[in-house]
Every structure is written in C-alpha cells, then in structure tokens.
Image (spheres, rainbow, N blue to C red):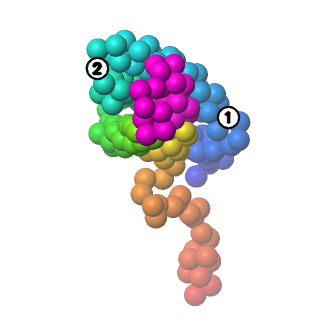
Amino acid sequence: MTVPTLIRRSAGNDRSPRRTLGQVGSFTLIGVGSTLAYVALYALLRAVSPAAAANAAALVVTALGNTAANRRLTFRVRGRDRLARDHAAGLAAFGAALAITSASLAVLDLAIPDPSRTAEITLLVAANAAATLVRFLLLRLALDRTRPIGLTARPPRPPSAVPVLERIAR
C-alpha cells in the first residue's frame, strides 16, 4: 500500500478533537433550531390538547427533521447506505427524549397542580437539553461512518513482513 493511499484512508478515519468539536457545533446549531420549532409546536398544540399529547406530537415532528439534518450536516452522511440503521438510532433518540420529557411533565404535574404554560415550556426546554446529550451520543455511535460497525470491529492491521521473512529464511 502506498503512502498517499494510507494518508487518504486515515483522513477518512479522523477522530480528532477538531472534528469532534465541528460535530458538536453543527449538532448544537441544529439542536437550537429543533428546540425552537419544538417550543412553537408545543405551544400551538398545548392550546388544544393535553401536555403529554402536545409533547409527543411536537417531538415526533422535530425528531424527524433533527435526525435528517444531523445525518446530512453533522455526520456528513448521504445516500441510502445504512439508512434504516440510522433512522433506528433516530427512533431510539426519540424514545429517550420522549421518556425524559414525559417524566419531567409528570413530575411537574405532581409538584405543581395545573402548572402555567411558561413553567411547562421552561421545564421542557431543560428536559430537551438533557435529551440532546443522549441524542448526540446515540446518533454519533450510529451515524459516524469513521467508527467501526459492531462492538467488536477493529481496524485492519497493517501487512506484516514476518511471513515473507520466514519463507525467505527457509
């Protein structure tokens, strides 16, 4: 294998802090946009439905857009390769977000009977911040194409000269 080939291959496997910071920055911008959309949808839906239903509906809509945007912009994944796996990770992230936000609403309702919309939204923004950390970790594990697939996958070893030297020595 030539040196330029090794350089090209290693560039695709760059897990440097700089690359991670770029992913975090992109993820954050997409997350802020998703959160603003979530808050707007929640506020609109909450006027006509219970908190749990408004929460779930707003999360469904924003989670779809969030996963698609992060897949393309944060992790630079295009095409249909492993699309089902990527959206399964998005679904897991949605489930985590739904569990965190629903639990937060339940605790709020226990602590303050009939809380104000402002209290609900403030709590949900904080809960979404926690869910965002979980979402980033899940999506990074699933969508980052520089990471090996599977728990035991390892990068290939460089070719060894030992077998050739042993044959020559015989």
Magenta stretch: dominant secondary structure = helix
Q: Is residue 71 above or below residue 133?
A: above
Closer to the N terminus: mark 1 or mark 2?
Answer: 1
Q: Which residue is mark 2?
A: 49
Decide if residue 53 is on the left or right side of residue 23: left
Quarter of the rendering containing residue 72: top left
Picture quarter with the C terminus: bottom right
Give me the residue at 29% from left, 39% from top: 84
Magenta span of residues: 108-129
* Spatial CA span between label 1 and label 2: 39 Å
Which numbered marker is on residue 71?
A: none
| Residue 143 visible from this viewpoint | no
Residue 88 point in image, percent of width and height: 33, 42
> Residue 29: percent from the left, percent from the top?
58, 22
Which amino acid does the dot numbered 1 rest on? Leu
Contact? badges 1 and 2 (CB < 8 Å): no
